[in-house]
Image (spheres, grey):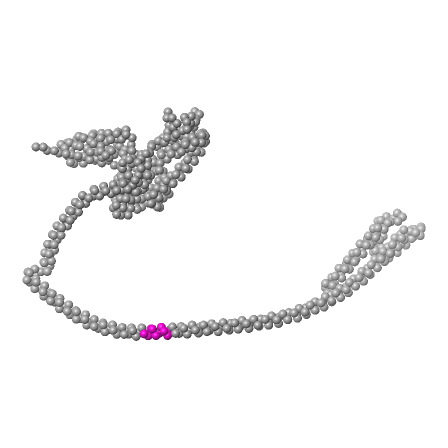
């Protein structure tokens, strides 16, 4: 109902608005007559709409003032009445239309209400039908589920019954076995009781027999003591004294024989082990050089290397730290540097510059950086190959870097990294010949010269530096001690330390391992003989075995036995102080006394 009323009110408002708009349009379209102004006409129209009595008053006034029966005011008044009548007619039509619309709306609402009630009834009937159908289906499904559940319960009950019967049968069988076992246990217990009683009787009999035997033994011992005139303690002392003398004599003889055999075979066995070790390690002879030679495509390249006013050669030496020696040697220049790694970097840099042809300070710096990277990669690869060759693992990365630097370091012409590998091989063979595990020995022998990579950077001998590096980077104490003791700067305290010394001496002392120039070699031997000859009482001096042994002949009337030992120590100390030499030098003082009649 509320909706219908709103519709009717809306329609009435629309009709009224349309009527007002229509009247306004007609008033605007109607022309003014006899010079009457629009303002006067609008004023009079407004007055006509406000009050009907005012219209008559205005009309009387107009008639009194007018002189002609065709006055314009009468025409305006007539038009006003027509408009009012027309507006009243339109109002009545609007009211009638609204009433008709209201009636139609009420009829429509009633019709819609009846349709809605019919639809609601149909929906109720449909819902009831669907509910009944759903209830019936649910009842059928519930019956089916209940039937299936009953069947499942019956099956489970049957299975449980079968399981219970099986379990009951199993329990009965177990009870039967337990009963049989209890019967056997009872039988065994009875048998054990009988045996225990028998054993108790036998034990008592044996105890009695033992007492009888002990009494008889005491009687026999007393009879023997009476016959021999000695007690048992005195007889034991005499027997032990006699046996002890014989045993001591046998032990002394055996000890003497073993010592003699050990002295006789120790030297031969040591020589055999060293010979086998060196022979089994086939190494190349040294062929290292102390300088690097760069071959040039032509002598005009020397001028390009020098550059304008020496600019290029100064830049090269400043960047690389390597001295460039340019002499009259055709198509070649020499590179000299105390650091072999820097010398190798300089060699590679100069070779690349010569091959490229562009030689100027900026290009020298670029090629030098490339060469440093390449040499670092080569050092790392060389260290990895060496570690794989000797078969050790777990080496610290810092030690690996130092091992790579030893690829370009030499000691008396012998490549240090190759020397480490060879020493490790020899140490492993020695360990195998002597019959013990050589893992620690091979590791110590491989790392014994690691300090040479830092000798010019850190003060101290390479052996002490190597031991400190080994401890710093996680090596065991046995390895560190063997490294620092391989030149006797620390007293060797383990078998590994002594064998590392032996392996190092074998690698450095074998023929062809190390070389010196002839002039340096002769000068060194002459200086050794000169040092030994400068002491009092020395008659002759011989430098033997390439300067590794010095034999000093002394006058017996001037040097006695005690002075001979002092002289040997003095000569050795002076040689150690004044000379530089590979390995060790043995000083032997020979004092010979001759008497002829």
Task: Determine the residue positioned at 42% across, 37% down.
Answer: 373
Residue nearer the viewer, 127 or 335: 335
Residue 313 screen position, x and y as percent: 41, 28
Residue 343 placement: quadrant: top left
Examine the rendering and report whether any part of residue 311 can be seen: no
Left or right relative to 165: residue 54:
right
Residue nearer the viewer, 432 or 129: 432
Residue 334 screen position, x and y as percent: 37, 29
Count how many numbered circles sit on residues in the image: 0
Task: Determine the residue positioned at 32% across, 34% down.
Answer: 287
* Magenta highlight on residue 222: no
Residue 52 screen position, x and y as percent: 86, 57
Work out whether 312 lies above or below 143.
above
Q: Quadrant of the C terminus?
A: top left
Q: What range of the chain is rendered magenta?
A: 171-180
Task: Determine the residue positioned at 29% across, 41% down.
Answer: 281
Left or right relative to 178: residue 210:
left
Q: Quadrant of the N terminus?
A: bottom right
Residue 545 placement: quadrant: top left
């Amino acid at each position: 109902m509320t909706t219908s009323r709103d519709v009717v009110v809306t329609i009435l408002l629309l009709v009224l608005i349309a009527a007002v708009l229509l009247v306004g349009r007609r008033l605007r379209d109607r022309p003014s007559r006899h010079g009457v102004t629009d303002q006067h006409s609008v004023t009079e129209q407004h007055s006509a709409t406000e009050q009907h009595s005012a219209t008559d008053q205005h009309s009387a006034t107009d008639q009194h003032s007018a002189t002609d029966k065709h006055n314009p005011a009468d025409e305006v008044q007539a038009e006003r009445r027509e408009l009012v009548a027309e507006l009243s007619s339109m109002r009545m039509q609007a009211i009638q239309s609204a009433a008709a619309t209201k009636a139609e709306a009420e009829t429509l609402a009633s019709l819609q209400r009846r349709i809605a009630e019919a639809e609601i009834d149909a929906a109720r009937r449909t819902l009831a039908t669907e509910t009944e159908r759903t209830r019936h289906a649910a009842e059928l499904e519930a019956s089916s589920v209940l039937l299936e559940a009953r069947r499942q319960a019956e099956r489970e009950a049957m299975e449980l019954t079968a399981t219970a019967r099986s379990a009951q049968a199993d329990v009965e069988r177990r009870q039967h076995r337990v009963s049989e076992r209890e019967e056997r246990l009872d039988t065994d217990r009875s048998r054990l009781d009988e045996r225990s009683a028998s054993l108790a009787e036998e034990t008592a009999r044996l105890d009695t027999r033992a007492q009888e035997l002990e009494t008889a033994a005491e009687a026999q011992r007393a009879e023997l003591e009476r016959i021999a005139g000695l007690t048992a303690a005195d007889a034991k002392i005499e027997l032990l004294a006699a046996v002890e003398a014989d045993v001591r004599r046998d032990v002394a003889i055996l000890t003497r024989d073993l010592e003699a055999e050990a002295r006789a075979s120790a030297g031969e066995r040591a020589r055999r082990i060293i010979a086998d070790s060196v022979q089994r390690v086939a190494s190349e002879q040294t062929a290292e050089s102390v300088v690097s030679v760069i071959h040039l495509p032509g002598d005009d390249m020397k001028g390009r290397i020098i550059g304008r006013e020496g600019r290029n050669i100064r830049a090269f030496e400043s960047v690389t730290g390597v001295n460039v020696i340019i002499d009259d040697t055709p198509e070649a220049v020499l590179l000299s540097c105390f650091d072999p790694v820097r010398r190798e970097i300089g060699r590679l840099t100069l070779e690349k510059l010569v091959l490229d042809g562009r030689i100027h300070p900026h290009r020298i710096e670029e090629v030098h950086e490339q060469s440093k990277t390449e040499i670092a990669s080569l050092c790392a690869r060389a260290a990895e190959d060496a570690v794989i060759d000797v078969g050790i693992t777990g080496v610290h990365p810092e030690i690996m870097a130092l091992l790579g630097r030893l690829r370009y370091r030499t000691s008396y012409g012998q490549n240090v990294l190759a020397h480490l590998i060879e020493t490790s091989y020899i140490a492993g063979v020695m360990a195998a010949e002597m019959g013990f595990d050589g893992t620690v020995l091979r590791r110590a022998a491989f790392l014994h010269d690691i300090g040479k990579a830092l000798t010019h950077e850190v003060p101290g001998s390479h052996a002490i530096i190597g031991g400190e590096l080994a401890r710093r980077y996680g090596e065991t104490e046995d390895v560190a001690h063997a490294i620092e003791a391989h030149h006797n700067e620390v007293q060797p305290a383990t078998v590994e330390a002594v064998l590392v010394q032996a392996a190092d001496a074998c690698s450095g002392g074998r023929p062809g391992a190390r070389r010196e120039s002839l002039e340096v070699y002769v000068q060194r031997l002459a200086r050794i003989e000169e040092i030994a000859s400068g002491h009092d009482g020395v008659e002759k001096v011989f430098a033997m075995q390439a300067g590794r042994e010095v034999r000093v002949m002394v006058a017996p009337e001037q040097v006695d036995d005690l002075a001979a030992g002092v002289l040997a120590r003095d000569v050795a100390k002076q040689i150690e102080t004044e000379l530089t030499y590979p390995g060790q030098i043995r000083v032997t003082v020979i004092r010979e006394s001759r008497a002829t009649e």
